[in-house]
Amino acid sequence: MSKIRFTKMHGCGNDYIYVDTMQYPIADPVQASILWSNRHKGIGSDGLVLIDKSPIPEADYSMRIFNADGSEAMMCGNASRCIGKYLYERGFTTQTNIRLLTKSGIKTLKLHVSDGVVESVTVDMGTPQLENPEQFVISRGLEKGSFVSMGNPHYVIFTDNVDQVGETGRVLEHHPAFPQRCNIEFAHVENDEIIRTRVWERGSGITQACGTGACATAVAACITGRAGRRSRIVMDGGTLDIEWRETDNHVSMTGPAEFAFDGEIEL
């Protein structure tokens, strides 16, 4: 067996195992993610993130994300911020603007650095796609929701009961309305800037935070007249600042990224 070095990181509690595949290639990331993400028998995480050089000149580095169930995700905002911190603080780059290739395109990371430490990262998340801009009820008398894609699919339900995330999120992830499955957000607007949100993440279940989910929630709140173009999304693990810019229709997300620990595991 070979030994793999890994780093555990989190963004607002959304935790992943990060592996530099430039040094430690992983032949079967699906199986590795399932085994390592197990919180009782493995390292414990919401999934596995692979960091590599970009295969195209338009980007500097690339990432692939595998959920705890082994399914591959298109994009993760929290993971992209963590990669920015990892690359800078581990000496891979001295640049504070990094172009990151993901399954949903190239994302630009702006690192906010003080005394050599990345204190926060702003990610240009691109333009939201409103494939189903009308509101629709999908089952069982639930409140109307908004479908927003941030490179991955989200269904945002505004409700006074965000704690239904467990009982309802599991059902809606697999609802026939979402043939590719879906991330589900339950959000309560506290005022026109603060939105309390809980997340059921496709392939991982309840997570402490979701960057793309925070962006989708902010966009949904704006298009339904519940909030303006700037929102603070308060999730179980922390808060993200979201702006849906009028200038180019892009969504920017700013938040922290933290190291948890380094380790070594056999593969």
Image (spheres, helix red, strand yellow):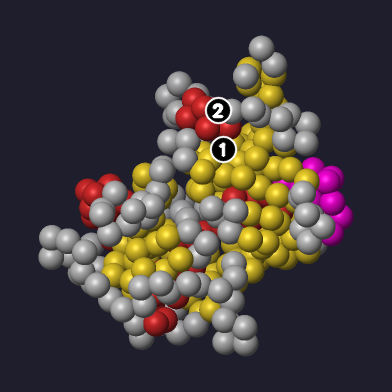
- Under tag 2, what secondary structure? helix
Q: Is residue 190 above or below residue 165?
A: below
Q: Residue at x 35, y 73 (%)?
A: 132
Q: Position of residue 170 (x, y in %)?
A: 28, 47
Q: Residue at x 66, y 63 (%)?
A: 107
Seen from the viewer's position, the closer of residues 263 and 222 is 222
Q: Which residues are magenta?
A: 85-95
Identified by mark 1, the residue type is Leu
Do tag 2 and tag 1 residues touch (Cβ < 8 Å)? yes
Q: Position of residue 208 (x, y in %)?
A: 44, 50
Tell me the CA gap for discs 2 and 1: 8 Å
Identified by mark 2, the residue type is Ala
The quarter of the image holding the N terminus is top right
Q: Position of residue 156 (x, y in %)?
A: 34, 66
Residue with the most extreme top position: 1
Query: Badge 1: how crowded within 10 Å, few (<14), some, or many (20+)?
Result: many
Camera sees residue 100: yes
44 with respect to 201 (left or right): right
Query: Badge 2: how crowded within 10 Å, few (<14), some, or many (20+)?
Result: some
149 with respect to 144 (left or right): right
Camera sees residue 37: no
Q: Residue at x 18, y 65 (%)?
A: 142
The quarter of the image holding the C terminus is top right
Q: Is residue 198 above or below residue 27?
A: below
Of pointers 2 and 1, the one earlier in the residue sequence? 2
Seen from the viewer's position, the closer of residues 7 and 65 is 65
212 with respect to 191 (left or right): right
Q: Position of residue 125 (x, y in %)?
A: 59, 67
Can you tell which quarter of the image residue 106 is in? bottom right
Query: In the rendered picture of this protein, how many numbered marks are placed on residues?
Result: 2
Q: Which residue is mark 1?
A: 48
Q: Which residue is mark 2?
A: 32
